[in-house]
Amino acid sequence: MKSLIPEIKSRAAPLATEYISWGTFDAVELATEFVAGQVVHLMGLPDSTRPELVASAAATFDMFGPDNARYREAAPLAAATMTFHSREVSRKTVRPGSWTHALYEAADAGDIGEDDVVPLMSAYTTAAMDTTTHGITAALHHLAGHLRYFKELRAGRLDAAAVFNEAIRLDAPIQGFGRGVTRDTRIGDTPIRAGEQVWLSYGSGGRDPRQWGSFADTFRPGGDLHLALGHGPHACAGRHLALAQAASLLEALAHYGTRLENAGNPVRARNNILHGWETLPLTITPDRRRTSRPPSSTGT
């Protein structure tokens, strides 16, 4: 991941300056373009696959929710996505040296089966896009409502990673996930038997007053304690990439922009387990003095 940081930053800076030049922009559109472009590049997929990957990711997450109307509508879309991947992704179409190419090398070495390559690749492209996009959008939402923190980020007194971590504590991109209980246990006063299903609520955990007291619902960046990226053996495999992407884009926006504000009414995205916005209009004031000077590693 350390070797990827310069490349991620080099992609963030020109995209940030482009959107800043518009004055008003949709934070969801910005985050989606940045994250999806980076993931498609790292996985070595044809750029033509990007629209399909972006369009189908939300449907895949709907499949993890309850058997409701949204679940039933998403089922054929999710199935079509796997068919699309199997048709478009092959040894001939992926970029040499990419992460998907490494999966094919693992298949050649006998570490995984040939049929495992596309499903493994699909798991990463799905999980690494919508969640990171919603996390970055949440960070921009909170920064737009707290000019003080945007100024501190801009001045280098606040770490961009801390902003992202605090944003996903309050607004976990995945609000919860089911887990199977392997042995009889107890949570509080509730006995749970082996084999039963439990729902781990990241959204509720991030706002637990027993952990954060009276500030549980307050945006106060400075720590990295939360459950939004899982924990222990269930920690998110893509958390380091998500953090690097978020920090790079936030640093670039704070470097080239002087003021970030809300520009209208945001619209929430509807999904069975994802938590984020469909649109989030923001206005940013450009810093004319910094248009030719790239941001440093500290975000100043």
Image: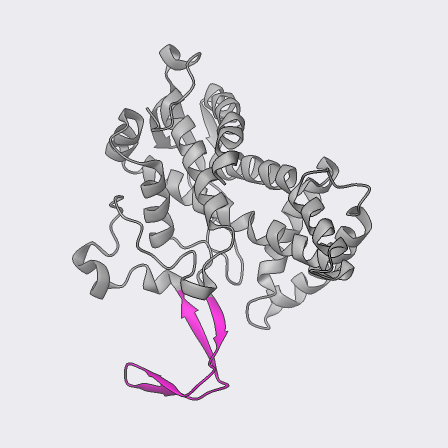
Task: Please provide the residue range marked out in magenta.
Answer: 177-201
Residue 263 % position (x, y): 40, 32
Closer to the camera in the image, 201 or 76: 201
Q: Is residue 128 above or below residue 114?
A: above
Q: How are the colours assigned in the image?
A: one colour
Residue 61 painted magenta = no
Residue 180 painted magenta = yes
Residue at the extreme front: 109
Give the prevailing secondary structure in the magenta stretch. strand
| Residue 263 in sight from this viewpoint | no
Instruction: Describe residue 144's horizontal placement relative to residue 87 as left or right.
Output: left
Instruction: Describe residue 143's horizontal placement relative to residue 238 as left or right.
Output: left
Give the number of marks.
Answer: 0
Instruction: Describe residue 215's horizontal placement relative to residue 132 as left or right.
Output: left
Residue pictured at 49% horizontal, 72% vertical = 178
Q: Quadrant of the C terminus?
A: top left
Residue 29 % position (x, y): 54, 36
Q: Is residue 42 above or below residue 120?
A: above
